[in-house]
């Protein structure tokens, strides 16, 4: 009797091709400041911040069942922590960005002690109330500029890592800030996607997928749903806080209205995930690309653009609840971020 | 005395919040639907009344009365053709649909009516008040509170004394069994949302007369409504009224300390109550 050797693998042919393409794409994106215009760098910055926020919201809503309409709270907190350090206690920018994430996660714990008491749809509105409370509280602080906000001090932006080198390479001061912010968000984006992908393949991540599919069944095989929800909530708020710091570092100005915008940091994010495909890592990526296309063609229309986006979100969740990626994936069987483990016979 | 006056103003403001909240309370009670567009639908009602009064030269109160059946049809159609398709076991679709609707209505109003502030003029009544001892009571705020009480009485009558109300309560308890009994829950839902929007229309009238409105203020009305429902406890209209009043009093007391503190004080009281009584003060429903 011949013995077969088996190996456990989760990668597929498509996923290997995709991984190779993704590495090439990331290398091109790193080199982009020398290859493309500054306008495009700003667009790419916006796309990637949106992608980071979308991946986080997707993890919350698509996997952990935490449908939040209040993630703008953590974008705003991250932004304000970063600006507070920059203005009052200039520490190295990278540390200030990290602190933004930590404070966002910390306030997230306090928020969760309240919002986690609310179930389902009530959780959604509860998170919105939290965001309002944080915004109103910050807008009252005259030391933080009250309702008009703060600007990033000139001296502080010159302490950004790589600022001097970029200046010597001929980038203007504000172009250098754009490029640094862009690289940082590129790093955040790649790390976020990889961490989420790795996490989904760990026992905890698989447990989360099980909770999403059937809470009772997951609990019966020993998955601690509550602990997982806390873990995901903390992690997402940490990343969202960092994203908030980067978004407003690039803008070099922060105010309560922009930092806590429910349209910018919740509505766009939610529609990106829903249209792209909720509950997959691929979905938000497709979603931001579609969002960017729509924006380039329709943003001049102002309110009409938002009407179209809202309508697309509604049609999408009713007609194709698993989004565009869900349609593609179910028809072709293609998975770019495979999570399932398959047995494969060797030799 | 100033304190008593402030509390009294808060109670009457609470009447307005209760009117915001009763429609939400109704749709949640009947079909477990949290309508994120509720605030924007109230605002849409205000603009309908403003348009009727402005372009057809109807007296404001007549315009509001004409708007109510329009709101009913709107709510009925909304439920029949959109929301019924979103209501399943999964809570995500109704949230996304109503959130999308909120953005849609908000920007639709912005496109049609611009961001300018508007107000429905009642020809002087809004400034009138009468003295009760040392206290001054505004006619319009008092009318708002009375309207809220009237709406609670009417809703309770419909819920507990009519065949329709029996269908509402039965749907709330067990929609599947009601279907087995031969009643089409989708129709029951459509009527419920229609009634909810009629209540929203009443709220819309008082919202537009009390202060200036613009297309962006809908979401904040939703949050006030939501807070009133939760404070009062799910499933009880009287609870919702008291929830609105508590919120109104909290806001005016906060506002008397510092005008910027008004809305925040309401949120904080809401959070505090939720900590102490997670199911609200007068809960009836069990989820």
Image (cartoon, coloured by chain):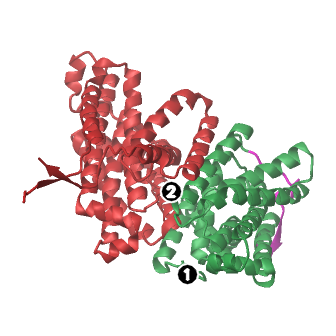
Chain colours: A red, B green
Image quarter for residue A245? top left
At mark 2, the secondary structure is helix
| Residue sitting at x 23%, y 41% | A94
- A320 vs B67, left or right, is left
**Residue carrying label 1:** B286
Estimate how packed mark 2 is, as few (under 14), some (14 to 19) or many (20 or more) residues with alpha carbons within 10 Å: many
Nearest the viewer among A124 and B62 is A124
Q: Decide: is A308 above or below A34.
A: below
Task: Kindly report which numbered mark, 1 or 2, lies closer to the viewer in this rendering.
Answer: 1
Tell me whether the residue at label 1 lies in contact with that at label 2, contact meaning CB atoms closer than 8 angstroms. no
Residue A83 at x, y = what percent?
Answer: 34, 43
The circle drawn on residue B202 is none
Please give the residue where the numbered disc 2 appears in the rendered image.
A132
Q: Position of residue A191 (x, y in %)?
A: 25, 44
Q: Residue at x 59, y 66 (%)?
A: B226
Q: Farthest residue in the top direction?
A: A170
Q: Is residue B237 visible?
A: no
State which quarter of the image contains the N terminus of chain A. bottom left
Could you tell me which residue is drawn at 55 percent across and 78 percent down? Answer: B280
Per the rendered image, the range of residues in magenta is B118-135
> Is B9 in front, or is B194?
B194
x%, y% of residue A12? 26, 44
Residue B248 colored in magenta in the image: no
- Disc 1 element: loop
Give the residue displayed 47% in from the left and 33% down from the top: A292
As measured in the structure, the alpha-carbon distance from the residue carrying label 1 to the one carrying label 2 is 28 Å
Q: Quarter of the image holding residue A13?
A: top left
């Amino acid at each position: 009797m011949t013995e077969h050797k088996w190996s456990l693998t989760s990668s597929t042919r498509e996923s290997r091709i995709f991984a190779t393409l993704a590495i090439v794409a990331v290398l091109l994106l790193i080199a982009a400041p020398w290859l493309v215009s500054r306008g495009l760098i700003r667009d790419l910055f916006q796309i990637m911040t949106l992608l980071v926020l979308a991946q986080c919201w997707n993890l919350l809503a698509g996997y952990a069942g935490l449908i939040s309409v209040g993630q703008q709270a953590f974008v705003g907190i991250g932004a304000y922590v970063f600006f507070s350090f920059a203005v009052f206690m200039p520490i190295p920018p990278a540390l200030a960005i990290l602190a933004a994430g930590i404070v966002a996660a910390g306030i997230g714990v306090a928020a969760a002690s309240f919002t986690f008491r609310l179930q389902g749809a009530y959780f959604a509105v509860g998170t919105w109330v939290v965001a309002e409370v944080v915004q109103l509280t910050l807008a009252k602080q005259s030391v933080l500029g009250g309702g008009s906000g703060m600007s990033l001090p000139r001296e502080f932006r010159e302490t950004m890592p790589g600022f001097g080198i970029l200046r010597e390479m001929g980038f203007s001061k504000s172009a250098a800030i754009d490029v640094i912010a862009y690289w940082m968000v590129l790093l955040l984006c790649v790390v976020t996607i990889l961490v989420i992908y790795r996490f989904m393949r760990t026992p905890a991540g698989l447990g989360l997928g099980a909770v999403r599919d059937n809470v009772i069944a997951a609990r019966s095989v020993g998955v601690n749903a509550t602990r997982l929800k806390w873990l995901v909530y903390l992690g997402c708020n940490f990343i969202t806080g960092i994203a908030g710091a980067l978004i407003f570092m690039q803008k070099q100005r922060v105010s309560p209205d922009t930092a806590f915008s429910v349209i910018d940091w919740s509505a766009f994010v939610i529609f990106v995930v829903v249209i792209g495909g909720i509950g997959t890592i691929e979905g938000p990526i497709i979603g931001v690309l579609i969002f960017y296309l729509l924006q380039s063609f329709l943003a001049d229309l102002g309110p009409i653009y938002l009407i179209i986006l809202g309508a697309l979100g509604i049609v999408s969740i009713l007609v194709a609840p698993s989004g565009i990626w869900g349609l593609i994936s179910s028809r072709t069987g293609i998975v770019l971020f495979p999570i399932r483990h398959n047995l494969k016979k060797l030799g | 005395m100033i304190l008593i006056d402030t509390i009294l103003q808060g109670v009457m403001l609470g009447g307005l919040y209760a009117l915001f909240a009763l429609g939400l309370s109704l749709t949640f009670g009947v079909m477990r639907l949290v309508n994120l567009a509720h605030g924007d639908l109230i605002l849409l009602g205000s603009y309908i009344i403003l348009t009727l009064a402005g372009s057809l030269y109807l007296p404001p109160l007549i315009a509001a009365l004409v708007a109510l059946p329009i709101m009913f049809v709107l709510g009925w159609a909304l439920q029949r053709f959109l929301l019924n398709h979103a209501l399943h076991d999964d809570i995500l679709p109704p949230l996304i649909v109503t959130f999308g609707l909120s953005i849609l209505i908000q920007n639709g109003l912005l496109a049609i009516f611009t961001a300018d502030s508007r107000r429905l003029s009642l020809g002087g009544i809004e400034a009138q008040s009468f003295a009760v001892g040392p206290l001054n009571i505004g006619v319009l705020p008092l009318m708002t509170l009375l309207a809220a009480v009237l709406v609670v009485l009417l809703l309770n009558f419909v819920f507990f004394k009519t065949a329709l109300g029996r269908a509402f309560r039965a749907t709330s308890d067990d929609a599947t069994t009601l279907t087995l009994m031969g009643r089409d829950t989708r129709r029951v839902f459509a009527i419920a949302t229609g009634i909810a929007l009629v209540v929203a229309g009443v709220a819309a009238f008082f919202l537009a007369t009390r202060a200036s409105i613009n297309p962006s203020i809908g979401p904040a009305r939703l949050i006030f409504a939501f807070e009133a429902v939760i404070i009062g406890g799910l499933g009880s209209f009287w609870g919702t009224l008291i929830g609105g009043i508590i919120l109104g009093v909290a806001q005016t007391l906060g506002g008397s300390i510092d005008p910027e503190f008004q809305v925040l004080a309401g949120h904080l009281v809401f959070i505090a109550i939720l900590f102490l009584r997670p199911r609200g003060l007068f809960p009836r429903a069990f989820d």
